[in-house]
Image (cartoon, helix red, strand yellow):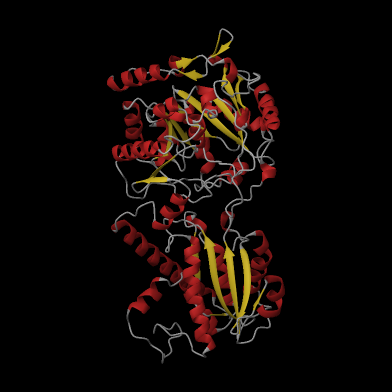
Amino acid sequence: INKGFTTVVQSIQGKVLDQDTCIYKYLFCCTNKAVCVFLVATYTDGQPTENAEWFCKWLEEASTDFRYGKTYLKGLRYAVFGLGNSVYVGHYNTVGKNVDKWLWMLSGMRIMTRGEGDCNVVKSRNGSIQADFLAWKVKFLNRLQALAKGEKKTCSGNCKTGGSCKNKRKEGHEQEEEEEEESSSDEEESGLQDEKKSGSVVDMEDLGNIMSSVKKAKLSKMNGLKKTEDEGERREMITPALREALTKQGYKLIGSHSGVKLCRWTKSMLRGRGGCYKHTFYGIESHRCMETTPSLACANKCVFCWRHHTNPVGTEWRWKMDPAETILQDALEKHQNMIRQFRGVPGVKPDRYEEGLAVKHCALSLVGEPIMYPEINTFIRLLHSHHISSFLVTNAQFPQEIRSLVPVTQLYVSVDASTKDSLKKIDRPLFKDFWPRFLDSLRALGEKRQRTVYRLTLVKSWNVEEMQAYSELIALGQPDFVEVKGVTYCGESSASSLTMANVPWHQEVVAFVQQLTDMLPQYEIACEHEHSNCLLIAHTKFKVDGEWWTWIDYERFQELVQAHEESGGQQSFSALDYIAKTPSWALFGAHEQGFDPADTRFQRRNKTKDISGC
């Protein structure tokens, strides 16, 4: 399944052959005891996976080629299970539907309804694509047992041929379940049934009637589904299967769509082993930073996502919504409980433990797209009312939400690629108009007066050659800072083809940043955090009298944002109003390479690396 295309020939006696052995021998020379099972995945833009392209192309051509004839696969018994993601509305499980249809058009006999697995855990009938397959597999094996006993498939009593049926079953729960799982392929075929009965030639006058009936059937089903969804109560974002998967990964889930998790840098700084790059670049106290999100859903499926795409995806908010007050209260409580687990742990510094219980910073970058949460402005105001700074990250797909966002301490936009093609390849966005949204998001960022940041993630062999295009994007949004970080390899995943070969060395990141900075007249390299493979490019307005002021005066920010709120938004402020001097050890070129000399560097040996963190 992970490869995208698997063909299995299953005889009644249970013999299984691989694709290369069976595809020719059994597809065209099958007996009435053979069953072909096709497991096919739908990939980018509704296309088949690479190893299924040749088969799908041949099958499509054969289904419409008069030289083959409409009985070319007569005698073939088959079943199809498609794998897709329903958030890609325009081409959800397209390949599975087409393979099913083309086999049927060549007179193949479907032994059971086509199965569909959905990667979108919110819409998946059984909670996950794996569960969808297992549920279909049980029914498939039951069907094989029935065939082994010589039984025919029971009929629903609604035969398309119009003939009488001797096997009408009684109405009941089993019939309702079968109707619920009936595939749309039946509707697609309904308009072609008359053609099969009457022969291979269709009058031009009749073609319009055939297509009209197909469209009406599709429209009727779509309207029925939409009506049910609108009238029914909104579902929770976190399904039981998703809750189990995220909990196993260490997330502390909040309500129905939020979560909090302890960053590895928080643990590191509690032990005096150094802070994250935000500590080096902006003066964050990593042991007092809470990493959370009010929305686990995202509008992208990035190849380097270190959550392995276990979180839900979507382009708009369509779930139940929890109040911002409840989310923040539960997030603080769960974060403090995780900190309390370090009490008395060897190596943990007592003073930092006590400080860690009082959250001072909030990184809204845990997972998903926080800006999708309808009450994000209320949530940010609540953070500031608790004197907690806000660092919000967005994936540049919601320009209007960026424009309507209240002032935050620092606003990030992920710029993972600089061209339309590479962005589509790396971020795999759900929006069809992702590129105009991306560019408009950068323009919206440029309209903000508070601190703004581009976050570039370098993926070797994917996006490191687009130097000129990156410089043009920076000119478009005029960010205060540009963070350039080498991608972090998070292990093998069926959702991504990323390998260690795609992770650049720190020297390669430095070389990229130096070349990029040469193309930006108003920017220079300010800071470096070698431990995170990350560098900071800063606008020269933050270089005062030859010294960098990239750090943040957090107390001053709280005063400014409070005055802004009390004035009803009339009293504004800019990024230069709450700057602080950057220490020498954090500067690019320092021998510390961004590691705070107040801490002790810890080298991990022969242990699994914890890659979690913001």
Image position of 426 with respect to 230: above or below: above
Q: Nearer the viewer, residue 55 or 357?
A: 357
Which part of the image, by quadrant, shows the N terminus?
Answer: bottom right
Q: Is residue 159 left or right of residue 419?
A: left
The residue at the point 57 percent across, 53 percent down is 495
394 vs 11, nearest the viewer:
11
Q: Is residue 518 above or below residue 156?
A: above
Relative to 213, 104 lies left or right: right
- Foreground pick, 516 / 446: 516
Q: Which quarter of the figure has residue 384?
A: top left
The x, y position of residue 518, in whole percent, is: 68, 22
Relative image position of residue 312 (x, y in whole percent)? 45, 51
Q: Residue 285, relative to residue 47: is it above or below? A: above
Q: Find residue 311 and report its horizontal and vertical position in percent.
A: 46, 49
Q: Is residue 312 visible?
A: no
Place of residue 341 in the rendered image (x, y in percent of width and height, measured from the top left): 41, 39
Question: Residue 431 versus residue 609: which sits nearer the camera?
Answer: 609
| Residue 118 left/right relative to 2 | left
At 29% across and 37% down in the image, what residue appears? 325
Q: Residue at x 67, y 78 (%)?
A: 68
